[in-house]
Image (tube, coloured by chain):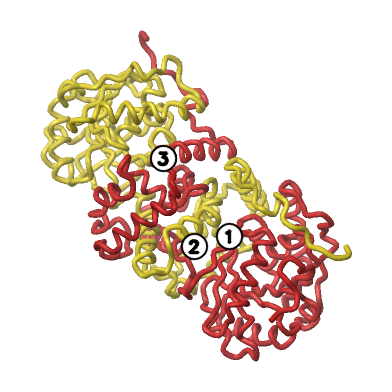
Chain colours: A red, B yellow
Amino acid sequence: MTTTTPEDVRRVACVGAGVIGGGWVAHFLARGYDVTAWDPAPDAEARLRRLVDAAWPALTRLGLAEGASQDRLTVAATLEEAVADAQFVQESAPEKLELKRDLLTRLDAAAPPGVVIASSTSGYPMTDMQTTAADPGRLVVGHPFNPPYLIPLVEVVGGERTTAEAVAWASRFYEVAGKSVITMKSEVPGFIANRLQEALWREALHMVANGEATVQEIDDSITEGPGLRWAFMGPMLTFALAGGEGGMAHMLDHFGPSLKSPWTRLEAPELDKDLYDAVVAGCDEAAAGRTIADLVAERDQGVIDVLRATGRLPRQAAGHAEPKGTM
Amino acid sequence: MTTTTPEDVRRVACVGAGVIGGGWVAHFLARGYDVTAWDPAPDAEARLRRLVDAAWPALTRLGLAEGASQDRLTVAATLEEAVADAQFVQESAPEKLELKRDLLTRLDAAAPPGVVIASSTSGYPMTDMQTTAADPGRLVVGHPFNPPYLIPLVEVVGGERTTAEAVAWASRFYEVAGKSVITMKSEVPGFIANRLQEALWREALHMVANGEATVQEIDDSITEGPGLRWAFMGPMLTFALAGGEGGMAHMLDHFGPSLKSPWTRLEAPELDKDLYDAVVAGCDEAAAGRTIADLVAERDQGVIDVLRATGRLPRQAAGHAEPKGTM
């Protein structure tokens, strides 16, 4: 299919250079790649260079790959010029289906044969975007999180007409380029993380719309609460620990009935035996031999590390008034 | 109302000593309080002491208050004995409305007059729980997150018959005891963080039920993705940064239409002008004078700190194969 192995890629094209596309540019530059970018906006180059400039100190602290340099960025005058020599193409255009479909068709026409072209789309299935391309087989979704130069996750999934080879190549390439990859077996609108994030976002918008919570309260409720755990232990394993020594099974026994409570506008699925078993077994698998006590110790250390690292040792450790009286 | 000021409290009673109640016990012990606990389960004391034991190393690393000791824990034989001398009562019984209502009624009858009694309920409105108590005015919700000895957040809210003084007293007491407090103005089922968390949890359960994602993929999608940001910057302000230099207004212009997308089973509210304005203004307020560039720098540093603190410097900084070829 493609002539370059993921390990041998040196030249990456980034098409669309807004927040996400520009973030990809910064990431690939920091990893030592030659990057060619294109964006039709009149002020795109200045904005892109500002974005890369702003990201560079963080990337330097993280550690640049040998030879990494902002000088390796070329801003092309045309889309065709941007991808003419590319060994991988990342498309990050605005989130409009028609626009992305047309752009991917043009990219496919202009890029060297066999080169994989990935879309940063936040949620369109590639099946819907690849309909007019001459070679749909090389078009994949490679969905990053903002900022792509720091958040490791990339969700990779193909459309109905994408080849398995293109999906595997993209997944491997992103890994080589320093990302954490989830390769999805099937297309789901919004992929995985965005579905979770979107559920939370919509519930937050409902609360603001109804005057139930302010923006500040919503943000505080996460950063002072569950967000501290989610930085290193996902919601499923975290919830398993709410079940005490009984783990997820006990948690579902205890909190399962809450799925009927109006704690969110989202209707819950029926917690039947199949789902119960799947969640419990999935947590066992994710725990990978760690006992509940191991996981509790890991979570506790993680929360302390995160609080300390972000300069927020809880007030209890920073000298509140001691309880008074005879001791 | 109560005779003890929040700053002068020395004796706390914890009723219900499972994961949450036991976590409260560990927290109050670490803060130097005398704690009396009660739980009707036959093995409750042994389980509670194991839990406190397991938490103690973490609490020691965080820094114990002067005089803090596991020896300050007394396990009482009866509920009445547990609260007889308490200056504050934290109820953490199983999540069953009838049970909590009865327990709060008994606690109100047994605790010294004026002492504030808080429920750890995950979502019941106090209005529904305080109906049979002789003095409902002192009953408040003080909803923690697991584990209460590490996660700072406590959501405080009263029911219709709770006095404003009891709510204010509880909020102040939790602050003195080292917690981050959100004092809610009105009762919403699930309060704030649980509504957000529950929306995410339900979407996750739907995905498992439909075979769209595994438990492991769901957890990875958060810990490698948005969870890294949420440890120190909430979902609202984080999303504002997806709007680039235009902030939340630009983000809503760009991603607002996605609210119509099937990216979660949760229906979105109408993004009308009122909601749009409220979200944008709320983000401005939360930013408190910080520019988008300030927030980007803060987010970037935060992500790096969190990655480093949890031993997960992204692979890009830990020596992947460098791009090859002439440089």
In this rendering, the answer to whether B19 lies above or below B254 is above
Q: In x, y percent, where is residue A234?
A: 46, 52
What number is the disc on residue A153? 1
Q: Tell me the chain of label 1.
A: A
| Disc 1 + disc 2, Cβ < 8 Å | yes
Which comes sooner in the sequence, label 1 or label 2? Answer: 1
Looking at the rendered structure, the secondary structure element under dot 1 is strand
Q: Which residue is mark 2?
A: A193
Q: Tell me the chain of label 2.
A: A
In this rendering, the answer to whether B21 lies above or below B241 is above
In this rendering, the answer to whether A66 lies above or below B169 is below
Residue at the far top in the pictured view = A326
Q: Which residue is mark 3?
A: B153
Q: Does residue A192 appear to the left or right of A256 in the view shown?
A: right
Quadrant, the C terminus of chain A: top left
Using the image as rendered, state which of residue B208 and residue A221 is in the foreground: B208
